[in-house]
Amino acid sequence: MKRFHAHIAVDDLANSIDFYSKLFGQSPTVERADYAKWMLDDPRINFAISARGHAVGLNHFGFQAEDAAELQELRQRADAAAGEAVLDQGETLCCYAASTKHWTVDPSGIAWEHYQTMGEVEAFGSDTVSQSGGCCVPGVATTSEACCVPGTQAGGGCNG
């Protein structure tokens, strides 16, 4: 069964961990110096927060698949929704996890991540434009160096 995923950028990680721990009635499942994650069963959600230089607020939504078949189903849905504007990252390290994933962006510019977690890792991840920024999140690029979903930027850059 898939698990809904929400990731929020925060400016005060310690205060946010305290708030969400009380709100959810449990401590984070994973806690690092710049990141925390709660794997809740009721409701079934993977809720993550990070303080890595992104604007405060919603970072991205997603679905965490339990197996390769669920991830393939999610890929088919992403393809149906976004056509060629799906970024396939394949196997990657992101948010202290080893995963297989792909991304798309909705019509309002909100990034959606579909992934299967293979295990935890010690590093936040290296597949980001800036180590001070958030991990892996595609978006409409403003420069050719930015990470983005293929086909979403007019006039060059990440079309591909």
Image (spheres, rainbow, N blue to C red):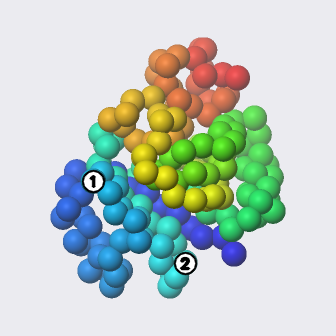
Amino acid carrying label 2: it is: Arg
Viewer-nearest residue: 110 or 37: 37
Q: Position of residue 130 (x, y in %)?
A: 39, 30
The answer to whether 84 appears left or right of 87 in the picture is right
Q: Which residue occupies 43% across, 57% down? A: 7
Residue 23: name its quadrant: bottom left
**Number of numbered discs overlaid on the protein picture:** 2
Q: Which residue occupies 33% across, 85% down? A: 25
Amino acid carrying label 1: it is: Ala
Q: Secondary structure at mark 2?
A: strand
Q: Which residue occupies 66% across, 44% down? A: 91
Q: Which mark is residue 33?
A: 1
**Which mark's residue is nearer the viewer, 1 or 2?**
1
Farthest residue in the front direction? Answer: 122
Q: Which mark is residue 44?
A: 2
Q: Earlier in the sequence, mark 1 or mark 2?
A: 1
**Mark 2 crowd level (few <14, some 14–19, many ≥20, 10 Å Cα):** few
Q: Position of residue 56 (x, y in %)?
A: 29, 49
Quadrant in which the C terminus is drawn? top right
The answer to whether 67 appears left or right of 132 in the picture is right
Q: Position of residue 136 (x, y in %)?
A: 51, 40
**Mark 1 crowd level (few <14, some 14–19, many ≥20, 10 Å Cα):** few
Viewer-nearest residue: 17 or 55: 17
Q: Position of residue 17 (x, y in %)?
A: 26, 67
Residue 22 appears in view: yes
Residue 137 appears in view: no
Viewer-nearest residue: 29 or 158: 29
Whole-Å distance between the Cαs marked 1 and 2?
A: 25 Å
Q: Secondary structure at mark 1?
A: loop
Tell me: residue 79, above or below residue 130. below
Q: Which residue occupies 79% across, 56% down? A: 72
The answer to whether 149 appears left or right of 142 in the picture is right
